[in-house]
Amino acid sequence: MEETKKSILITGGAGFIGTNLCDYFLSKGYKVVCLDNFATGHRHNLKDFIDNSNFRLIEGDIRNLEDCQNAVKGVDYILHQAALGSVPRSIKDPITTNEVNVSGFLNMLVAARDAKVKRFVYAASSSTYGDSQGLPKVEEVIGKPLSPYAITKYVNELYAEIFSRTYGLETIGLRYFNVFGRKQDPKGAYAAVIPKFVMQLMQLESPLINGDGNYSRDFTYIDNVIQMNELAMLTQNPEAINTVFNTAYGDRNTLNDLVFYLKDNLAEYDPKIAGIAIEYGPNRAGDIPHSLASIEKAKKLLGYDPKFSLQEGLKEAVSWYWEHLK
């Protein structure tokens, strides 16, 4: 039970994944510090626990070293989620993406090192596989990055490895594959595909698929991601430390499959949704055709056991969206 007294800093804690991590670890009795500048996160995501005596919000920016140093004081673990996501956003504005994802990441590593934090677990990305053709993706084989965003996430891995080797900071990177679930924002130019499609279907609008819909992804429900963060944070396996892990379900579905499942789930709430036509447009720059993770390394070294397939996760996610967005 001693672990429950520990303190965790969750950067980007007002964002989609960060909020879910805050919620989960508070429910487990941890003290949680959230650092966020609300560039992409939302205050309303924190409303359920903002008054919890074990929760502390620091409004700050990882691009500012002082904010990072302030946030890491007295914490045992860091779950670093803060980043500017989205391949299209990085193509449009590579400078800001680099400032947040590389300079901000380096600031957090320096602050963690100086505060002698026990472990630094960070959000890496499946975009690091770049133009590598092989499926499933295994951690040790990557290609060339296809976007500025992918470059920044790969640089994170390189910096983490150097900080482990040079300063002895324990780091673990989690290469997220297309995470979805409750509290994921459906609004904005860079909204993720699942909440965006759900919102459009609920409004009886036709979703637009980039390409012919046969691109496939390893869609990963948020609860699988929470499990991976907890395992990475607490593992005592020396082989699991100072490395990276795919964080996924280990299965792939096409975008056409995805829309079919979404319509099927949403039609239970509104039968009209079943008849909505799908529109198709050009492929998106920087997109990889197929993505599928091998999760063998995480199973072997961390004991990872994901509970939610795409269909099981969608059932939960759609129920949450219907309740909160309708």
Image: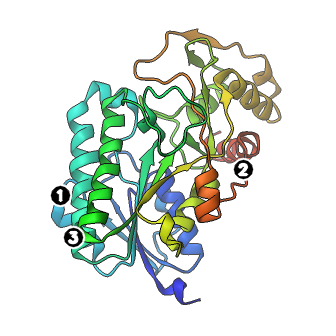
Label 2 to label 1: alpha-carbon separation = 37 Å
> In the rendered image of this protein, does residue 54 appear above or below residue 294?
below
Q: In the image, 125: left or right of 227?
A: left
Q: Name the residue nearer the viewer: 36 or 236.
A: 236
Q: Which residue is mark 2?
A: 308
Residue 149 % position (x, y) = 34, 35
Q: Secondary structure at mark 1?
A: loop
Report the residue at 29% width, 46% height from top.
Answer: 101
Label 2, residues with CA under 10 Å away: few <14, some 14-19, many ≥20: some
Q: Name the residue nearer the viewer: 161 or 180.
A: 161
Identify the image quadrant of the C terminus.
top right
Q: Name the residue nearer the viewer: 25 or 109.
A: 109
Q: In the image, 318: left or right of 172?
A: right
Kind of residue indicated by mark 2: Phe
Kind of residue indicated by mark 3: Gln
Residue 22 % position (x, y) = 50, 65
Label 3, residues with CA under 10 Å away: few <14, some 14-19, many ≥20: some
Q: In the image, 151: left or right of 195?
A: left
The label number, if any, that marks residue 69 in the structure image: 3
The label number, if any, that marks residue 64 in the structure image: 1
Q: Name the residue nearer the viewer: 186 or 313.
A: 313
Label 3 to label 1: alpha-carbon separation = 9 Å
Kind of residue indicated by mark 1: Asn
Identify the image quadrant of the N terminus.
bottom right
- Specify which label sits upstream in the sequence, 2 or 3: 3
Report the residue at 66% width, 43% height from top.
Answer: 250
Report the residue at 20% width, 35% height from top.
Answer: 95
- Specify which label sits upstream in the sequence, 2 or 1: 1
> In the rendered image of this protein, does residue 156 appear above or below residue 258?
below
Residue 25 % position (x, y) = 54, 71
Q: Is residue 59 visible?
A: no
Label 1, residues with CA under 10 Å away: few <14, some 14-19, many ≥20: some
